[in-house]
Image (cartoon, rainbow, N blue to C red):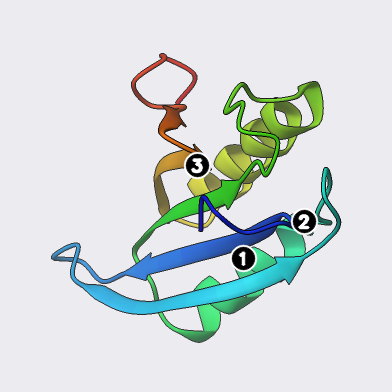
């Protein structure tokens, strides 16, 4: 994922034991943007009866620092998932040779 030339957004959907139910590409975009629709992410989680999820996207630029839009979308997804009883374990941004974890940085 780090070597891709366009942004890609994936979700790993987990069951109650945090076992992987599905690893799905939910969106692909351009070199510096991919559209993410929280409603669609949650719709898929509910369809799969997921209890938790980890979201992941890449930054082809090589810099894993989250944008303001990344931070805002993560907060929105976290709020929505909590209201539905689904745990958002982390949001990872992958870049060439490095990554950013919202959980490790205290943003989740």
**Quadrant of residue 32 within the rendered picture:** top right
Residue lying at the far bottom in this picture: please name it. Answer: 47
Q: Residue at x 71, y 56 (%)?
A: 5
**Quadrant of residue 13 within the rendered picture:** bottom left
Q: Residue at x 52, y 57 (%)?
A: 84
Location of residue 66 with respect to 16 vertically, above or below? above
Q: Residue at x 72, y 54 (%)?
A: 7
**Quadrant of residue 104 within the rendered picture:** top left
Q: Which residue is mark 2?
A: 36
Residue 49: give x, y in percent of width and height: 41, 80
Q: Earlier in the sequence, mark 3 or mark 1?
A: 1
Labels 3, 1: front one = 3
Q: Earlier in the sequence, mark 2 or mark 1?
A: 2
Q: Which residue is mark 3?
A: 94
Residue 94: give x, y in percent of width and height: 50, 42
Pointer 1 local density, CA inside 10 Å: few below 14, some 14–19, many at least 20:
some
Q: CA distance from mark 2 to mark 3?
A: 16 Å
Name the mark on residue 65. Answer: none
Q: Which residue is mark 1?
A: 42
Which quadrant: the C terminus? top left
Residue 43: give x, y in percent of width and height: 65, 74
- Mark 3 residue element: strand
Labels 2, 3: front one = 3
Location of residue 107 with respect to 10 vertically, above or below? above
């Amino acid at each position: 994922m780090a070597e891709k030339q366009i942004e890609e957004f994936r979700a790993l959907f987990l069951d109650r034991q945090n076992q992987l139910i599905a690893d799905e590409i939910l969106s692909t975009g351009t070199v510096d943007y991919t559209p993410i629709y929280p409603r669609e992410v949650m719709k898929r989680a509910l369809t799969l009866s997921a209890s938790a999820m980890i979201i992941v996207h890449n930054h082809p630029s090589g810099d894993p620092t989250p944008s303001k839009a990344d931070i805002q979308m993560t907060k929105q997804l976290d709020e929505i998932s909590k209201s539905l009883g689904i745990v958002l374990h982390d949001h990872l941004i992958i870049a060439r040779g490095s990554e950013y974890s919202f959980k490790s940085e205290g943003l989740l």
